Image (cartoon, rainbow, N blue to C red):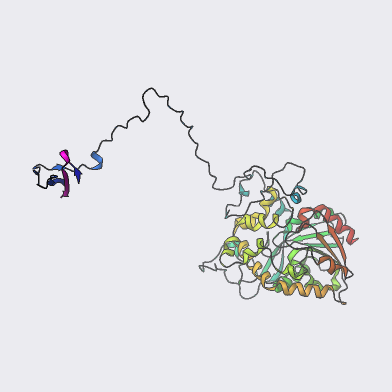
Amino acid sequence: MALGSGGSLVQEKVVGGSARCALRTVAGGAPGPEPTKPYPLLSPRRLSPKPQQNPIPHGTRRPPMAPSLAAPRFHTALPRRVLLRPQKPLPCWRRAARPDDQDLYVDDDIGDGFSFSGGKYAEAEGPSKSDEWFAQGRMVKAHALYGNKEKAKDPFFGLTMGKGSQSSDDVFSWFCVETGSSSNPTVLLIHGFPSQAYSYRKVLPVLSDKYRSIAFDWLGFGFSDKPQPKYGFDYTLDEYTSALESLIDAVAPDKLSIVVQGYFAPIVVKYANEHQDKLNHLILVNPPITDKHAKLPSTLACFSNFLLGEIFSQDPLRASDKALTSSGPYMMKEEDATVYRRPYLVSGSSGFALNAITRALGKDLKGYIESMRSILASDSWNTKTTICWGMRDRWLTYDGVANFCDGLKHKFVELPMAGHHAQEDRGEELGNIIKRILR
């Protein structure tokens, strides 16, 4: 409908793909003449664009055009060396721990997302740090599988899993690194959760002149076997206690001293209580002691969540870098991070093991802590015991630790600049403390 010349009102109707003038009504009410020839409806392809008129009057100076913007560059995976971002102000507790050298360190925020690329250790030129560490150790057979040996299957789809999730033999293989003469007294170095024997790389050389030192990877960590849960090993705390006894019988049949760090300490104390005649000394580094310590920090508890736990435990950055650097002032070098990431990059078995262990700790850790306190306070406990505490532990609060140790006959040593993983923060310092305690 349109307004015709002379004030007439024109109504148009589309019929059969063409437009006809159906009715012309004059302002006076009388119908006007109807056109006899139809005119075709133009399709959009036949329409020619109208030339746009210049909105700027003639003679007016045009404004300068904005410079063209370059498209942002995106990275689908971490390069061989971590992408550097602008330095952010560090909190005082981390500034004090920053080393003086200019080596490349892992970003504090790494591992917050689903970073499944996890760095590319395989692209490094020459042997990687992980390969060099593996070359220093050996595999030790200890602790038999339970039940019949069948192929492990994926818990979601029931598909047969790869070699990394299968047990290598009827007896599990443990990765061990040993330094010092076999004629020297034996010291067993036990890493915490979630870590590896690699965490003692700075402690081993310090002890090598006086002691035969052995560091090993727990089942489910590092280069040791990582069987799928329900296929020979379920990663319960009771199973770890039994497996530890088998390993110690294999690597140190005679008397020894034990150093254990973190959440595996209650397991070691339970073993030691049943084998006091075999121990010279027990050193606990940041063990969970109080009832508050029974609750895992959110950085670890996330691995036990339903469904999300399976996803998070497969993220190499969240499972290694984030878990280690969030526990204290530790500044992890990129070359060290590749060692911790490697098990999660080569197989999903490490993630499934991490998920199972976290759930076991959430279920049984409180009872094990109560049992450990009872053992250490018992009159029947005759093993020389020292508790070392990294004062910058961000996972386990210091409240109540000193009070517990004051009421006992055990030694207590503070490490002011260390966090939860003291052997990572202050490896050489911890090594010298161990030597002074054992001599």
User: Looking at the image, is 173 positioned above or below residue 423?
Assistant: below
* Furthest-right residue in this view: 439
Q: Decide which of 152, 154 is in the foreground and name it.
A: 154
User: Looking at the image, is 9 positioned above or below residue 63?
Assistant: below
User: Looking at the image, is 399 positioned above or below residue 82?
Assistant: below
User: Could you say where residue 281 lies in the image, as x and y percent from the top left?
Assistant: 86, 66
User: Could you say where residue 344 lies in the image, as x and y percent from the top left?
Assistant: 62, 57
Q: Decide which of 111, 223 is in the foreground and name it.
A: 111
For residue 207, what is the image quadrant?
A: bottom right
Which residues make up the magenta segment? Answer: 4-16
User: Looking at the image, is 437 positioned above or below residue 367?
Assistant: above
**Residue 207 visible from this viewpoint:** no
Residue 20, magenta (yes or no): no
For residue 265, side relative to residue 306 (left or right): right
Q: Decide which of 161, 337 is in the foreground and name it.
A: 337
* Furthest-top residue in this view: 59
**Number of marks in the rendered image:** 0
Q: Quadrant of the C terminus?
A: bottom right
User: Could you say where residue 230 lies in the image, as x and y percent from the top left?
Assistant: 61, 72
**Residue 317 visible from this viewpoint:** yes
For residue 239, what is the image quadrant?
A: bottom right
User: Could you say where residue 325 lies in the image, as x and y percent from the top left?
Assistant: 70, 54
Q: Residue at x 59, y 62 (%)?
A: 163
Q: Residue at x 61, y 69 (%)?
A: 229
* Furthest-front residue in this view: 28
For residue 328, side relative to residue 439 (left or right): left
Q: Decide which of 389, 430 is in the foreground and name it.
A: 389
